[in-house]
Image (cartoon, helix red, strand yellow):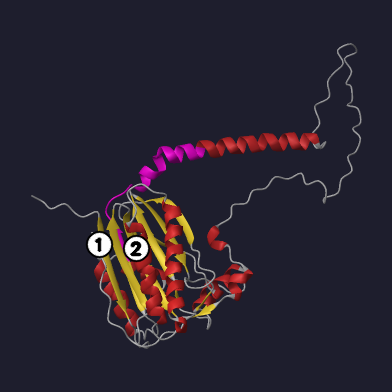
Amino acid sequence: MKRRKPDFEYGNLSDVGRVRKENQDYYGRYEGAFGKLIIVCDGMGGYEGGSIASRLVVDAIAEHFKALGAHYDQRFEMEQAFIRAQGSIREFVKSQPEKEGMGTTAIVLLIHNELYWFANTGDSRLYLKRSGKISQLSKDHSLVQNMIDKGILSEEEAANHPKRNIITKALGTEHFMPDIFGPFTLCKNDVFMLCSDGLYHYFSVDELSQILDKPAQEACEFFVNKANELGSDDNVTVQIVKSYCGSTEQQIEKSPDKKLYRIVLLSSLSLLLVSSLNLLQQFGCLYPKAKKNKQDNEEVKPKPVSAVSASKDTIQASVSGNIDDPRSKVSEQDSMQSLSKSRSSKIPKQKDKSKK
């Protein structure tokens, strides 16, 4: 009897790199009634501080989800998990004040019932490869990303900027709340990659895409070995998830949700058009056609309409819409709280924390 192929394939690996003395990265993978949870953290904060922070956060987020059943509000619980993780760091610092300033980034992927959510704080990343195309799903909370958003730097310039390691959000600091996105539909053959900045700085987007075609664990080993060959001046951590279940892109396009969305969109546009026409007519921008007098069959000109005097400051006869992308919101206060990562010393290599 032919053995059934598993729904998911996993790979993971973490390495201290070629320069650091301590690995302050940490990762975890967990399964339960809540679904599947994959986490990568990149710690910071001097000797041992970063490694402690990254472990505390992975453990706290995992414990939060383990206590949940199969039915829950994923976005709410993701937020609560980060709040719990923040509390774990702050409590530890209270007991050991010398560790003040320790913190960590976090990138979290949650898969449940063929849907997925993700959350991030800091500059660890989540990539998705689907139908041969790779895209970065998360957005860095970093000084150079702020500069890109403001048009000061290009993506190419940011990649080699001397301050690219300064982040504006991290667990353990005042600004720790993550960006949370989802739900999104999981597709067959989706490939997710979670990684610390010690990995993605050494590869172009095309190189990432090509390597992700390898089996999950083989790809992880290739990434880490190649980064080390290139001199890897930071810890390197990666987790890869390959999905062999879920919908096809064609099914997503034909889904009832997709059709309903289009109906709602068209209805909204129709209502907006009618409202705009009424608004224009109200301010005298549209006039009804002149009627003919049946008695003498002569055209009757419309009576003059008194001019409406209004300045641009008091009347704006335009309708506009604005959809905010949460990933693009960066406050000046966040930039003021920029954090510079520093790491040292060495700790034992981590093992995959799979929980079935």
Categorize mark 1 by other alpha carbons within 10 Å: few (<14), some (14-19), many (20+).
few
Foreground residue, 272 or 208?
272
Instruction: Tell me which amino acid carries mark 1.
Output: Lys
Q: Could you say which quadrant of the image residue 259 lies in?
A: top left
Total numbered circles:
2
For the view shown, which residue lies furthest in the front direction? Answer: 95
Foreground residue, 104 or 283?
104
Q: Which residue is mark 2?
A: 62
Q: Residue at x 42, y 61 (%)?
A: 81
Left or right side of 258 for 269: right
Categorize mark 2 by other alpha carbons within 10 Å: few (<14), some (14-19), many (20+).
many
Residue 355: assigned label: 1
Left or right side of 10 for 71: right
Residue 338 visible to the viewer: yes
Q: Could you say which quadrant of the image residue 347 lies in?
A: bottom left
* For marks 2 and 1 on the same chain, the one whose residue lies earlier in the sequence: 2
Left or right side of 174 for 120: left
The location of residue 164, given as percent across then percent down, is 51, 78
Residue 212 visible to the viewer: no
Q: Residue at x 59, y 38 (%)?
A: 268
Q: Quadrant of the C terminus?
A: bottom left
What segment is highlighted magenta in the picture?
Answer: 240-262
Q: Could you say which quadrant of the image residue 277 lies in?
A: top right
Q: Does 336 appear in magenta?
A: no
The location of residue 68, given as percent across then percent down, is 34, 53
The location of residue 5, given as percent across then percent down, is 19, 54
Instruction: Tell me which amino acid carries mark 2.
Output: Ala
Circles 2 and 1 in contact, beta carbons < 8 Å? yes
Q: Is residue 124 above or below residue 226?
A: above
For the view shown, which residue lies furthest in the top direction? Answer: 295
The location of residue 167, given as percent across then percent down, is 51, 75
